[in-house]
Amino acid sequence: MAVTVTPETFTMVLFDQPTIVASVSEIAAKVGMGDADIVIEVAEAVPLARCRIDSLDPITLSIEGGAFEDPRNPRQLSEHAVIDTVGRLLLQAGDRLDPAFGDPPEDGDIDLAHRVAWDVYAVGRLQQLGYESQRQRRLYGFRNRHGFTDAADDAFTRLWTGRDLTWDDITRLSDDALAVRA
Amino acid sequence: MRHALPPEDLARDERFVRNSFMVRATDPRLTAMPAEKRARRAPLNPDRADGPEAARALMHGIFTGEIQALEGAGRTCWDFPIGDGADEAPFELKLDMARQCWDEARHCEISVKLGDWMGTDIGEFAESVFLYEAACNPDPVLRLTGVNRALEGLAIDVFNTMREFGIQAGDPVLEFCEDWMLADEVTHVKMGSDWLRRLTADDPDRRTRALEFQRVVDKLFSLGGARGEEDDSPIKLARRFRELAGFNTEEIDEIAALSTESRQDLADVQDRAAAQAAATTSGER
């Protein structure tokens, strides 16, 4: 396994590359991707927080610098944010590599509600591994996409506590909650 | 108790982390961010992929602003002897500030509960004390124009944006809370407008100074045009509520123009930095 983080030296932000490598290595092992080659490309000049999976072999994650930033201390690294962001993306990369999971569309083509539901399923698994994961924050984001209804909250709980869900399970839970909102 | 408590002495527990305005203003990414990313500005609404996250961060900013508004109004009750002089405040003005303290304390409580609702911990985001800094002006009229008219005016725009966000998202809690706080903010701005006119009725120079101070604060906290009337402004200027708060059309037009100016200033700085970076790179080749 090799973890590569670029750039090696950050000039716009006060990020430490070896710290990121260590955090990524730790979370990769925890989510069962310890043997994978992982490339993290950080756009340090961008204080926004979008991130995506660019490829699966090697697993390449494209990260806007804001996604790794401490929201209390501008330009400083948050190891929690690294774990939260990379952990979620690695779990989703693992889903994509698992034939039993199904065949989700390309990242850019996923409907926003389905994207949020998949994120909830991924972060819920991080929480099950013992990582702090801000359940209420994720619930609020889910409610924004699926309605402030009991049906949405029930779907959220099933995603958050779910194991071995498939893409069809995730989209069905999302769609059923949206149907009640409509 | 001493008068004019400096911002650095505000009481906060260990959960709060404070950033100065300069930390953000001197962030090198402000000018280095690629142009296509800078252009990704959009109104704050639930359609934005990052809408709920942006609303959470803004709600935390509102919360810390409410604390400072309480502290500022409280100081104005105390910092000036009762009277009609330039460094004095009429008793009725202090009564208005006491009422505002009552409102702001309630807003703090509401904001904490909204933070819980949206999944935000107290101190999760940095606090900037610019509102309180504007409340440190030694002239009570300038203090009221800077805080009540400029910054509480900004609060009207922010609360209205958040209320609309709640309506569009179907979030009944956010909509209800923002609507009630918005009503109070309109009252606070109107207090500022009324006291500005009363206290400077016979002193046009003082009124000019106060309005100039307001313009400076308004432009500074247009946040590079983030608050404005353009289609992509994240925070919309709330004309109707500002009219209710005592602003006339000309004054609102001026704030909109200041916001456009502020946006252009920022774009100019970014363009100059990009050109400089390009020249440096080409010189290195």
Image (tube, coloured by chain):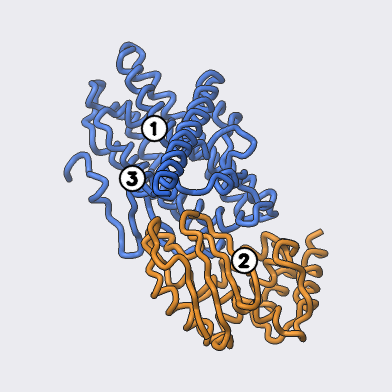
Indicate the secondary structure of the residue bearing disc 3.
helix
Q: Nearer the viewer, residue A36 or A47?
A: A36
Whether discs 2 and 1 lie on one chain: the answer is no
Q: Position of residue B220 (x, y in %)?
A: 41, 35
The mark found on residue B22 in the picture is: 3
Q: Residue at x 69, y 70 (%)?
A: A117
Image quarter hosting the N terminus of chain B: top left
| Residue B215 % position (x, y) | 41, 26
Work out how far the residue at label 3 is from the one at label 1, CA to CA, in angstroms.
15 Å
Tag in front: 2 or 1: 2
**Which chain does the residue under circle 1 lie in?**
B
Q: Earlier in the sequence, mark 3 or mark 1?
A: 3
Q: Which residue is mark 1?
A: B217
Rendered colour, chain A: orange
Residue pictured at 47% horizontal, 36% vertical: B222
User: What amino acid type should be assigned to the residue bearing mark 2?
Assistant: Arg
Residue at image point 53% right, 27% down: B256
Left or right: A9, with A54 as reference point: left
Name the amino acid, label 1: Val
Q: Secondary structure at mark 2?
A: strand
The residue tagged 2 is: A52
Give the chain of mark 3: B
Q: Around disc 3, counting alpha carbons within 10 Å, would you say few (fewer than 14), some (14 to 19), or many (20 or more)?
A: few
Viewer-nearest of discs 3 and 1: 3
Residue with the most extreme front position: B285
Q: Secondary structure at mark 1?
A: helix
Dots 2, 1 in contact, CB < 8 A: no
Tell me, by letter, which chain the rendering colours blue: B
Estimate the x, y position of residue B131 in percent, counting from the top left. 37, 41
Taking A8 as reference, is A118 left or right? right
Residue A103: name its quadrant.
bottom right
